[in-house]
Amino acid sequence: MDEGAEINIGLETGEKETHVMKVKDERGQVADEIQARAFEERIQNNVEKKLLQFEALMGEYAKQKVSEGLTVYLADGAVGNGEVVDGKLSVNLPNGNEIRTVRDNELAKPYIAILDGVGITYEEYAMAAAESTALHESVHMIIDSRPGSKLEKDFKDATDIENDEGGYTLSLLDEGITYAFQLEVDSESEVMKKLEKEKPQTKDNFIVETRKILGEKLREKVRTYVGNGWAINGAFLEDAGKMMKEIDMKRYIAESRLEKVSHSR
């Protein structure tokens, strides 16, 4: 398969169904056409509809319009990782050969044992994790939490909470909404549900822990708004602000600044 070749398949339901999400395999020499096609079908079946719902949830606070088209670029690297750089969404996914030979990797054996214990193949896990990553990063692309955005202004009007100079306050709101939505989506994934109780528990740092706490607090509200097809409004922002006031925001901002400095070195 040529590097950067585009895959865009429709699902046959009597006539060709139109999808707004596509996949491009940019893994160069390790590109895998069959896997990429399978991943695109998963994205179109499992992620596309969810992102359109999230776009509707964000309403006037949406920056990226998934409804206008979104391409996911496959990159070679550790599964579960992804990034958005200059509006380009890349998701790591080992190719089929790497997945088939993972059992030969001594470092992977403890995790393979966990997957075996719950009846999940590594291929199923890799595809589900890449799918989850694609959704998570896409949600961040949709939310317009940039300094000076309408969300920043309306959040201040609804809560009297000013965004800090580094933008970490609004960034936390962004992360909380993202995490809440992700929890709802992952709760529908059979792979993620099976792994939830079995995966190794690691201690999150304060920044990650705070984002998750806000996400848990916002989960019910996000579920209600999405279920009713409502867009985020002043009432939502007011409630989110109340939840954020229960969090140690000074520490969150301070540690976020330190993390940014350490990453820039």
Image (spheres, helix red, strand yellow):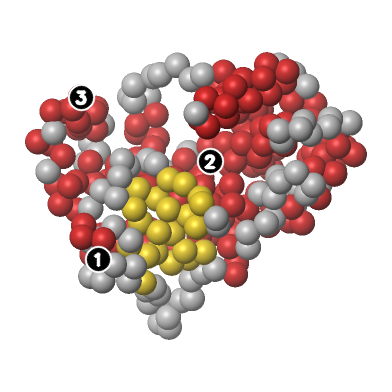
In this view, the residue farthest toward the bottom is 15
Q: Which residue is mark 2?
A: 182
Q: Which residue is mark 3?
A: 110
Q: Residue at x 43, y 45 (%)?
A: 82
Camera-side residue of 15 and 249: 249
As helix, strand or loop, the secondary structure at mark 3 comes to helix
Mark 3 touching mark 2, by CB under 8 A?
A: no
Give the residue type that dot 1 points to: Glu
Q: CA distance from mark 3 to mark 1?
A: 30 Å
Give left or right: position of 155 versus 96: right
Disc on res. 129: none
Q: What is the x, y in percent for residue 78?
A: 31, 40
Q: Residues within 10 Å of mark 3 (few under 14, many from 20)?
A: few
As helix, strand or loop, the secondary structure at mark 1 comes to helix
As helix, strand or loop, the secondary structure at mark 2 comes to helix
Q: Residue 64 falls in which quadrant of the image? A: bottom right
Q: CA distance from mark 3 to mark 2?
A: 26 Å
Q: Residues within 10 Å of mark 2 (few under 14, many from 20)?
A: some
**Comes first in the chain, label 3 or label 2:** 3
Q: Residue at x 26, y 48 (%)?
A: 94
Q: What is the x, y in percent for residue 161?
A: 84, 30
Decide if residue 239 is in sight here. Answer: no
Is residue 97 positioned above or below 207 on the image? below
Give the residue type that dot 3 points to: Pro
Give left or right: position of 11 versus 215: left
In this view, the residue farthest toward the left is 104
Q: Which residue is mark 1?
A: 33
Q: CA distance from mark 1 to mark 2?
A: 28 Å
**Comes first in the chain, label 1 or label 2:** 1
